[in-house]
């Protein structure tokens, strides 16, 4: 099949090329007229104006020498002689010359040691936030660590029970900072305070910022064998 296809392709191309050549030979008609060359009538002569060069800057050479012309765009060949040599102050100076005479004098007048670095005191700590009482716009903290109070033996023998009401200050991290007794039961107050101090709460947020709060908590003491 490939040979048949190749043979057919060669025959078709030969027929097309032959037909094209025969059409060119048998074509009749007048030849096209060549285009007229473009000519310029009345050409004008443009005069080229000579542009004068910029006057070269001159300077008198030291020592009474002749005046030399120096091109502004050409790099100088000879080193200039009217520039003073550098001193230690321009080049950075030696390790011992970091302070000038004025700085040394001011340092001595102020009582500072020359060559020492004055330490900048650290910024003062941020003022402590004042605990606020919980209100309706705030979600109360949730207790995550609960420690049950130890029932005092003296209160058990005295058959003393009841509810101790405390006021706890919870810092921004949720830890109990301080505890104050609001409703007292003398034999049970200390045990209630020690237990509440170990409680841990979730931080209380106000507008998305943790803040310390004041919260009222209760500790209920009940005898089990009653």
Image: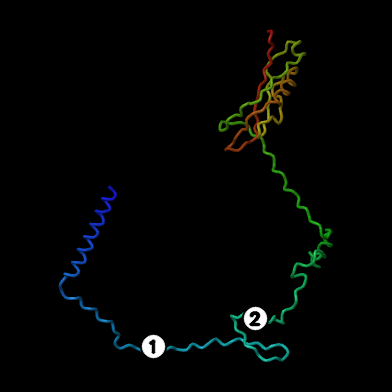
Callout 1 secondary element: loop
Neighbours of disc 1 within 10 Å: few (<14), some (14-19), many (20+): few
Residue 200: % across, % down: 67, 28
Q: Give the residue displayed 59% in from the left and 36% down from the top.
A: 206
The answer to which quarter of the image holds residue 199 is: top right
Left or right? Give the position of 157 relative to 172.
right
- Establish if 199 lies above or below 45: above
- In this view, the residue farthest toward the top is 226
- Establish if 46 lies above or below 203: below
Q: Nearer the viewer, residue 222 or 94?
A: 94
Q: Which residue is mark 1?
A: 46
Left or right? Give the position of 220 relative to 115.
left
Q: Nearer the viewer, residue 120 or 26?
A: 26
Neighbours of disc 2 within 10 Å: few (<14), some (14-19), many (20+): few
Q: Give the residue displayed 71% in from the left and 22% down from the top.
A: 195
Residue 69: % across, % down: 62, 88
Number of numbered markers: 2
Mark seen at residue 69: none
Question: Which badge, 1 or 2, comes first in the chain's sequence?
Answer: 1
Q: Give the residue displayed 74% in from the left and 78% down from the top.
A: 84
Mark seen at residue 76: 2
- In this view, the residue farthest toward the left is 28
The answer to which quarter of the image holds residue 139 is: top right
Left or right? Give the position of 112 relative to 48.
right
Residue 89: % across, % down: 76, 70
């Amino acid at each position: 099949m490939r040979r048949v296809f190749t043979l057919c392709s060669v025959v078709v191309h030969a027929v097309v090329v032959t037909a094209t050549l025969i059409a060119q030979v048998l074509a009749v008609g007048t030849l096209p007229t060549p285009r007229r060359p473009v000519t310029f009538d009345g050409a004008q002569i443009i005069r080229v104006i000579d542009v004068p060069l910029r006057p070269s800057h001159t300077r008198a050479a030291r020592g009474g020498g002749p005046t030399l012309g120096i091109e502004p765009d050409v790099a100088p060949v000879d080193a200039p002689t009217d520039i003073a040599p550098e001193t230690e102050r321009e080049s950075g100076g030696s390790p011992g010359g970091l302070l000038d005479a004025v700085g040394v004098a001011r340092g001595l007048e102020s009582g500072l040691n020359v060559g020492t670095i004055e330490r900048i005191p650290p910024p003062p700590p941020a003022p402590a936030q004042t605990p606020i009482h919980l209100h309706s716009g705030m979600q109360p903290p949730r207790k995550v660590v609960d420690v049950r109070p130890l029932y005092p033996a003296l209160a058990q023998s005295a058959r003393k029970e009841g509810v101790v009401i405390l006021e706890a200050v919870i810092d921004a991290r949720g830890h109990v900072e301080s505890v104050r007794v609001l409703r007292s039961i003398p034999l049970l107050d200390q045990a209630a305070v020690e237990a509440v101090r170990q409680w841990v709460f979730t931080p209380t947020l106000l507008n998305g910022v943790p803040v310390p709060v004041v919260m009222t908590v209760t500790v209920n003491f009940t005898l089990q064998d009653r």
